[in-house]
Image (tube, grey):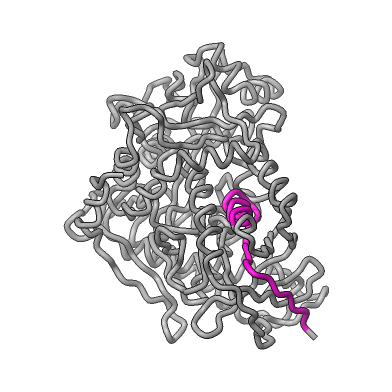
Amino acid sequence: MMKKIQTDILVIGGGLAGLCAAIEARRAGREVLLLSKSRAGRSGSTIMAAGNISALSDSDEDSAELFAADIVRGGRGIGDPRLALCLARESRATIGFLAECGIRFMHRENRLLRQMNPGHSRPRTLTVEMTGYPVQTAGLALSLPLLAIAQNIGVRFLENAQAVDIEVAGGRARGALILDGRGDFMQISASAVILASGGGGRLFSRTNNTNDVTGDGLALAYRAGAELRDLEFVQFHPLMGIAPARIIFPTTLFSDGAVLRNRKGERFLLRICPEGETTATRDTMARAIDDEVRAGQGIDGGVHLDLTGVATQIAQSRYRGLWELSARYGCDLSRMPVSVGVSVHFLMGGVTIDEKAATTLPGLFAAGEVTGGVHGANRLGGNALMEAAVFGCIAGRSASQIPQETVDLPPTRPNLPPCESSAADFADMATSLPRLLWDHAGVVRSEAGLRRGQQELDRIEIQFTTLSRIQSARRWLTLRNQLCIARLLLLAAEMRRESRGAHYRSDHPAQDDEKWKGSLRLRQGNDARPSLTFTEAAAAAHACLMAPE
């Protein structure tokens, strides 16, 4: 008999968004169970974060409307301005919430240290104090204090367990079917479900995401009937270390004197961005690096990041961990450059939500990178952590407004092949899919390439659906999710016949506001096939940025 668990609020995801949601829901007096695919607080994208988080400053020259306008402008005009304004207005209080939970921020002269980040019109980016944490997992400075709070106030945890499907009853999300760490299926029924499972960087072969970020939440929401949006917009980080170490270099380095150079030592970015690295957004920078590599002016498949212009005092305070790690690899950053390249960093698209973090499926809420709408076609630096924290807190509070209800779900099991240790492995499919997406839906795309990608995906799906036996249910379920989202991403990228933000089409290199200023929405149709619709960005909605606080 399948094991059943009853809870009040089910949170799926153990990173920044999930922990914030769980804390707020628990503080509201609700019983909370947090489900984590790996170890809560010690896995997922949060632990890889560089610790830069953008929040509304206390300067008279800044305002929530100005912050939101920067977000919408950076997203090339197709993000949801209501979500942008919500993030901006809640950001200052959210910093207070994080500080209350034990997260420390860098200060200068007893004031929060704020930096400029490309795309922001004011210095808003705070830096989490990460002293004592390894550079590669410095984001633990964010997640571990939140984990301790959640544990202390009575949040329950189920770790190393994978959500298989969202359970829907009476047109509402009522829980989830789970595969636990022992390989057994169980059902969790709940009054409300919060998706905070992160993005899908591991859909691509070149990424700086952790191994467990495989797009599961997107597939869960899609199969349950919720709407997704903007899946064609994938952010490529321009500063993934190639040599001497594979670490993420923060873009705030540019405001402190760092520059990019090609093989000839030229500051190539000046050709397309006369004001240089301090104003170039990540999509512009990533494409410029890709162009240099394709033109034969790259280094090790990337370009040089020259840090010699960063003042010693700043290097030893703000970036001490980077300097010390590089020194262990024999590289003195104050004297020699490092090689950096482009990698998949963040998905701008995801589950459609409103200002209450509610999805289009009643009872299902979502927060963090699993959602879409805040960033539009491109995300500004520092906004990912703030989005996760703001909407994580909102999701926890919103879910807590759902009346508690005991639900008896009928037993269900996924239709998957039997598991046998002697079954043929399908590792070739698991490696072919990320390579396919990088090759055909990478920094530069075209109709021909996207269609070749779909044809290759057809062949992988045929192999997958004809498997008669498998070795691992967990790996099969993960690949099922990846195949689902890869199909949607390729379809959306082919349909959008323009270049906008992070989505660049070599066969349609111009931004076309007349036809494509809006979002592609995706739902699972009645025949289980994807249904895509285009929704224009309403000019009236953008007027909310001018509304008084």
Relative image position of residue 329 (x, y in whole percent)? 69, 24
Residue 179 visible in the displayed image: yes
Relative image position of residue 199 (x, y in whole percent)? 53, 56
Q: Quadrant of residue 178?
A: bottom right
Looking at the rendered image, the quarter that the C terminus falls into is top left
Q: Nearer the viewer, residue 326 or 400?
A: 400
Q: Quadrant of residue 482?
A: bottom right
Q: Is residue 203 magenta?
A: no
Q: Nearer the viewer, residue 96 or 542?
A: 96
Q: Give the vertical position of 526 relative to 317 (above or below).
A: below
Q: Nearer the viewer, residue 242 or 25?
A: 25
Looking at the rendered image, the quarter that the N terminus falls into is bottom right
Q: Residue at x 50, y 16 (%)?
A: 310
Q: Give the vertical position of 338 relative to 334 (above or below).
A: below
Q: Nearer the viewer, residue 49 or 106?
A: 106
**541 left or right of 420?**
left
Relative image position of residue 472 (x, y in whole percent)? 75, 70
**30 left or right of 386?**
right
Instruction: Tell how many labels.
Output: 0
**375 left or right of 333?**
left
Residue 369 visible in the displayed image: no
Q: Is residue 9 magenta?
A: yes
Q: Give the vertical position of 130 relative to 294 (above or below).
A: above
The residue sitting at the front extreme is: 29
Relative image position of residue 176 (x, y in whole percent)? 63, 74
Q: Residue at x 34, y 57 (%)?
A: 446
Q: Which residues are magenta?
A: 2-24
